[in-house]
Amino acid sequence: MHDAIRQANLGNITPPGNFGAEPIDLIHEYGMLNLLQDAYDRAKTEFGLDAALPHTFILDKKPLRKSRSLHGQLGAYAYDLRSPILKHTWEAAYWSAQTALSAAALVSVGNEKYTYALCRPPGHHAGANYFGGHCYLNNAAIAANWLVQQGRRVALLDIGCHHGNGAQDIFYNRSDVLVCSLHADPLYEYPYYSGYADEFGANRGLSYNFNFPLPKGITEKPYLDALAEALKKVHLYVPDTLVLSLGFDTLEGDPVGSFKLEPDSFFQIGQMIQSLGIPVITVQEGGYLLSALGESVVRFFQGLTSATSPTNA
């Protein structure tokens, strides 16, 4: 994806700046952040393991007592087995979040209209006090919250194949970030327990969360129709900035996806998002069909910037 962006000459490619721990601390629970930083060393020292994974999960996400055991803490914060903590996991997750913050800052200071945070690992499945689904820190939520602090009116749109359960939970009781998500129906697809159409937010966040669950095997036309409905919600919110969680696991043939979009579909998606007429910070989420990722990301940005200046990557 990096090489395809460079070869297409879509804009400047820069390394991320370091915004420190505070923007991350404002989104994620202190205990989870500590665990992500020291779990590998503890697993290596205590058990001789090269990865930290839970073997026991709690059913109540708010236990009365917090275990001091590594396995007990892993089972309290991790909710699946898709996200092992390895030697460099914290370093990669930290800089992934900094990448999203850097893309947000380029827009916030007014230098760019479109920026792209090429994040790995992704983040939209990470909540305030849990991680999973290949995600450790919620890059898009961290960036969106930072933008709110800068006085921006922010909408977050997630168009990956799987529901951004972490972002929904983080903002579910808030009215300062609109969250919309297009994704596979959780009746049959990960993360199974959230992303239904009747989840509208709660308390101050009521009517600031909208889900568009889609059927297995959906093709381009009905997908774009659903995207148009989501963009109506975004337009009515009247944001001045969009944070876009962009997943390419919607491509036909993706090993973990169930949709049937083509690389050229993303050109149209880009054009539709451009029609909002506001700055867009695109944060990379999933996408595992390696042979099509480069073409897809280029087509998306060609659509997004088809009548504007090039993006800054």
Image (spheres, rainbow, N blue to C red):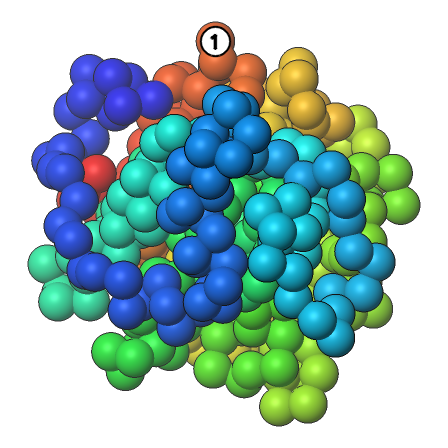
User: Label 1: which residue?
Assistant: 291
Which quarter of the image is occupied by the N terminus? top left
Amino acid of disc 1: Ser
Residue 216, x across and y down, in percent: 82, 32
- Say what secondary structure mark 1 lies in: helix
Residue 156, x across and y down, in percent: 49, 62
Q: Residues within 10 Å of mark 1 (few under 14, many from 20)?
A: few
Q: Is residue 74 visible?
A: no
What residue do we see at 46% from left, 40% from top?
42
Q: How many marks?
A: 1
Q: Is residue 182 left or right of residue 155?
A: right
Q: Nearer the viewer, residue 175 or 193?
A: 193
What residue do we see at 38% from left, 29% from top?
87
What residue do we see at 48% from left, 9% from top?
291
Judged from this view, the residue extending furthest toward the bottom is 204
Judge whether 278 appears above or below 91 on screen: below
Quarter of the view holding residue 7 = top left
Q: Is residue 205 visible?
A: yes
Q: Is residue 151 left or right of residue 67?
A: left
Q: Nearer the viewer, residue 148 or 216?
A: 148
Judge whether 286 appears above or below 126 on screen: above
Residue 308, x across and y down, in percent: 22, 46
Which quarter of the image is occupied by the C terminus? top left
Q: Nearer the viewer, residue 277 or 280?
A: 280
Quarter of the view holding residue 21 = bottom left
